[in-house]
Image (cartoon, rainbow, N blue to C red):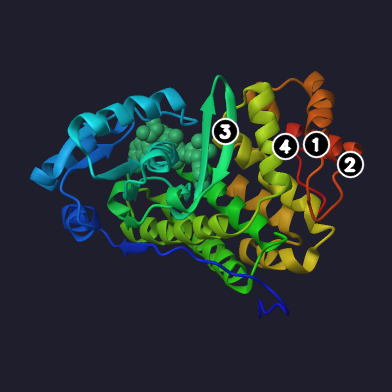
Amino acid sequence: MSFFQREFVAQSAAVRVSFGPGVRHQVGAEIARIGGQRALILSTPQQAETALAFAKDVGERAAGVFTGATMHTPVAVTEEAIAQVEEIGADCLVAVGGGSTTGLAKAIAYRTDLPQIVVPTTYAGSEATPILGQTERGRKTTLKDPKVQPEVILYDAELVASLPVPMTVTSALNAIAHAAEGLYAQDRNPLSSALAVEGMRAFAEALPRVVENPGDLDARGETLYGAWLCGTVLGQVGMALHHKLCHTLGGSFDLPHAETHAIILPHAIGFNAGAVPDLLAPVAEIFGGESAGQALHAFSEKMGAPTRLADLGLREADLDRAADLATQNAYWNPAPVTRDGIRALLDAAFHGQAPKH
Ligand code: NAD
């Protein structure tokens, strides 16, 4: 399979990636390598213990710990963390956690330009992108800025091994969504497509082994490798139907982020597979099915992922309004986004039926 394109623009960020079990213990050396003397270590309250262990490991170059990272990167939390940055004279940031903690590091870097070292503990992939989503007064906005891209990433499979299986599965599907949508992105390039295919292959190969044995460090390592590749794709290209639809459902009906993504993915990809079957052929091949959407649906079910919007608390009576909202603002997508088409997609996702393509 060749991803050759006649014309394209490709741009990659200068990021140092260090990969391997136990690599988190290199954080101190990485702080020194970027010239840092006073790091602020960031985490969620749930991962405070891990952050404190990092501070102990780093020693005198750890100037403080902020454990207030939370979902959707509220600006008020960022401001609180920046007050601590100023108070302790921090000259670099270390984020230990998932997309929420990475989001906080990015939000601080956006405002201070401090260098960031990120140690991911989920598969979300935010560490590999120059994208920042943040919320203020209930409104979420997204921006893209090179300042936001973390300079150093340490991928340590031992840290992801504690991620509970249901979160492991939804987080992996979130990563796969970036790769799958990357395959048909308008601004894709041969490198982003090759990364997308290899990233999905890593998850297809290793996620079943992780679900079987969450402590299997070899399988955890391979899924983390997949997370890096899929995150890198997200950093390079634009997303379409899947992400817009999840944004609408999450924002307007208060549905949980990770589960909503997991349920919508096979349907959004199936919706587009009819329009761009060749571009999505690798998805069908990697996950083993007649078509891309059906292959993802079968893989999700096998991994024990949620498959019915009905189970998330959405009511059947909400589907018409959801279809209206999701088709209100026009955006680019390989298949035309029609009200009837989206209503049918939502119906299938509501009942957990397999997509047509
Ligand atoms: P998360 O960071 O919100 O983590 C969820 C919970 O799991 C937290 O309580 C966290 O402390 C805990 N947790 C994380 N890793 C753990 C581990 N190994 N063991 C035990 N508990 C662990 O979840 P997420 O899915 O990684 O991130 C979601 C957020 O990231 C969303 O807000 C999403 O929009 C954002 N995101 C942004 C980008 C980007 O490029 N800007 C990309 C992907 C996701």
At which x and y percent is residue 182? 64, 59
Checking the image for residue 11, the label placed there is none
Could you give the CA–CA distance between mark 4 and mark 1, rounded to whole angstroms? 26 Å
Identity, as a three-letter code, of the amino acid under mark 3 = His
Q: How many marks?
A: 4
Q: Which residue is mark 1?
A: 329
Which quadrant holds the N terminus?
A: bottom right
Could you give the CA–CA distance between mark 2 and mark 4, rounded to whole angstroms? 21 Å
Q: Residue at x 56, y 55 (%)?
A: 234
**Quadrant housing residue 85:** top left
At which x and y percent is residue 56? 11, 41
For mark 2, give the secondary structure.
loop
At which x and y percent is residue 226? 47, 60
For mark 1, give the secondary structure.
loop
Asked if the beta carbon under badge 3 is closer than 8 A to the nearest atom of ligand 1, the reply is yes
Identity, as a three-letter code, of the amino acid under mark 4 = Gly
* Callout 2 crowding tier (Cα within 10 Å): few <14, some 14–19, many ≥20: some
Could you give the CA–CA distance between mark 3 and mark 1, rounded to whole angstroms? 21 Å
Q: Residue at x 65, y 54 (%)?
A: 238
Could you give the CA–CA distance between mark 3 and mark 4, rounded to whole angstroms? 17 Å
